[in-house]
Image (cartoon, rainbow, N blue to C red):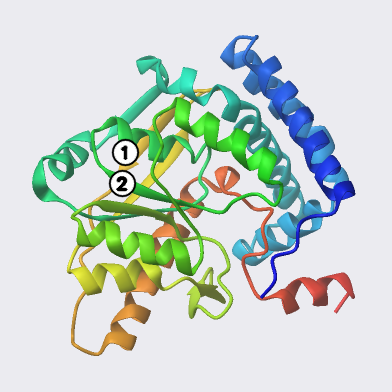
Amino acid sequence: MVNRRPALRQIMAWRFEALAYDVAAALARIFPIDSVSDFGAWAVRHLGPLTSARRVAEINLKIAFPEADDREIARLLGEQWSHLGRWAAEFPVLDRIIADPSRVEVVGAERLAAIRDGAGPVIFISGHFSSFEIMPAVIIHAGITCQITYRATNNPYVDESIRRSRWRYGVRLFAPKGSDGARELLRALSRGESVALMNDQKFNGGVAAPLFGMTAHTAPGPASFALRFGVPLQPMSVERIGKARFRVIVHEPIMLEDSGERTADIEAGVRRINRFIEDRVRARPAEWFWVHKRWPNEIYKKSRSGG
């Protein structure tokens, strides 16, 4: 297969986007952290409803909370835009947030210390809760060697800037999503290292498991890895407790049952992961990443056609 170089026009567009991103990030680093967070909340609360993501978020909220009336859905929509804006604006200054002990509280830090001191490796699992990038930073700052999975942005120059930002707060071991990343995760677990995966996005061809009472195709990777290596799933979540202040929770580990029926055991593991995600979303609904298409595409097409 021939790898084609991007057209000059595409490269120039990417570079312009990267320049805009770098300028915005540099400006964010000039101002106080809370001011940056407030600006992000204000901007996205006003701009988000004008985008196509508004319809996706509204559909998702109605799936998750069918009992909610229009007024409640509108309230949650507004709150999730504010949280989304805070997350986006805070990312360029996340190293400053992490460096301030008063801004990040860790519940269950003793579990991280035990993993560091020999109780690992584990499969860290979580979802896009609040300022979710704080979780890998907390794992690394606890002294745990961990491969962090990520999806590269389409713009390679912006992706490079994002990786530099993550480098500032200590996240340096990346495993890209896809087959290459999966092989790197297997190698890391074989070396006795932990791995961290986000497990709340749609995975085409994944395990069909319920989420909020509706089938959601979910990546089998975390459950498969845990069963293969006989290690626990270690759930984590993050909550916003102020403007740019957070509580990171290291939940009780989940040890999957290994009956020898690998397909059934993986499906059972995926269901347990989805239950964890659902419980956390129900507890703090405004803080989840509602703007991605979590359920089958047909649901969103049907809504668009008025069906």
Residue 19 in the image: state x and y as whole percent. Answer: 77, 29
Residue for point 39% across, 25% down: 104
Image location of residue 223, percent across then percent down: 33, 70
22 w.r.t. 148: above or below: above
Q: Count every numbered label the image shows and give the total.
A: 2
In the picture, measured across the screen, residue 162 lies left or right of residue 39, that is left
User: Which numbered circle lies on residue 146?
Assistant: 2
Query: Which of the 4 quarters of the picture holds residue 230?
Result: bottom left
Question: Residue 209, percent across and down?
Answer: 47, 78
Circles 2, 1 touching at the beta carbon (< 8 Å)? yes
User: Based on the displayed image, in which of its 4 quarters is residue 228 positioned?
Assistant: bottom left
Which is more toward the observer, 264 or 9? Answer: 9
SS at mark 1?
helix
Q: Quarter of the image containing the N terminus?
A: bottom right
Mark 2 belongs to which amino acid? Cys
User: Camera-side residue: 243 or 283?
Assistant: 243
The residue identified by callout 1 is 139
Image quarter of residue 37: top right
Q: Left or right: 22 with respect to 188?
A: right
Note whether 212 is above or below 307 in the view shown.
above
Task: Tell me the kind of residue under disc 1.
Answer: Ile
Q: Pointer 1: residues within 10 angstroms few (<14), some, or many (20+)?
A: many
Indicate which disc, 2 or 1, sits on the residue closer to the N terminus: 1
